[in-house]
Amino acid sequence: MDVAVKIVNSIRARSLRRRLFRSQLKDNDSEYEDLLLFCHVRWLTRGSSLERFLNLLPESIAFLDTLGEKHEQLEDPVWVKKLAFFTNSMGHYNSLNLQLQGKEKNIIELFSSVNAFKAKLKLFASQLKRQNFKYSPYLEKHIKLTGECNMEMFCSELENFNQEFERRFANFNNLQPIFEFISFPFGEFDNEDI
């Protein structure tokens, strides 16, 4: 992430470089006109800027080559696959964050969204173990370009993410019987659970 932010900032921070890069994108009939700037204050920009950077990676490498700048990570297939995996993950986190925001959301809906995301993390890991990239399109694209990779590394990362979610939302699990009672007041419940 730091390398990607550094490269984007080096291109966007200087107006001449930015104009040259935009001109190169226009000459190559690129899908995008420019890189997106990452900002720590606006959390959604992380996923968006990573997606744009990854989509413009070949153009960025070519542009940096014309300037005589080499970034070894950009040529390292393992690093690029990690970046692709991180980009996919950030996209999923952004969608969760959007689900957790907004007016008229109650705690039960938020609890359901968090639990669904934890289940999705397990699904993503099981899909990656089977080489199914339905939920990891950027990773799939870069594996096709650069060859095989160690899926266990990504599966263990997803398991670590899931453990972190379990730790952060442990208090929600203690409140689950109350949420179930509020959602289904005439269901069968043990008074001790509530």
Image (cartoon, rainbow, N blue to C red):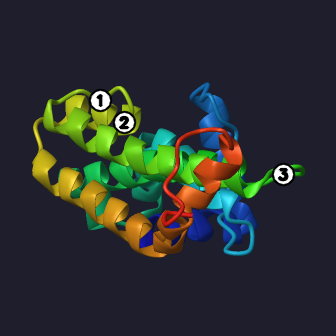
Residue at 51%, 42% in the rendered image: 56
The percent coordinates of residue 126 (x first, y second) are 21, 38
Residue at 89%, 51% in the rendered image: 103
Q: Dot 3: few (<14), some (14–19), or many (≥20) neighbours within 10 Å?
A: few
**Could you give the CA–CA distance between mark 1 and mark 2, rounded to whole angstroms?**
5 Å
Corner quadrant of residue 32 = top right
**Could you give the CA–CA distance between mark 3 and mark 1, rounded to whole angstroms?**
31 Å
Q: Which mark is residue 102?
A: 3
Q: Secondary structure at mark 2?
A: loop
Q: Dot 2: few (<14), some (14–19), or many (≥20) neighbours within 10 Å?
A: many
The percent coordinates of residue 3 (x first, y second) are 42, 70
Q: Amino acid at mark 1?
A: Phe
Q: Is residue 57 above or below residue 3?
A: above
Tell me the mark number nearer the camera, choosing from 3 and 2.
Answer: 3
The percent coordinates of residue 11 (x first, y second) are 60, 63
Badge 2 is on which residue?
A: 136
Residue at 45%, 58% in the rendered image: 64
In this rendering, would 133 be left or right of 174?
Answer: left
Q: Residue furthest right?
A: 103
Badge 1 is on which residue?
A: 133
- Label pair 1/2, CB-CB below 8 angstroms: yes
Residue at 23%, 27% in the rendered image: 132
Q: Amino acid at mark 3?
A: Gly
Front-most of 65 and 163?
163
Q: Secondary structure at mark 1?
A: loop
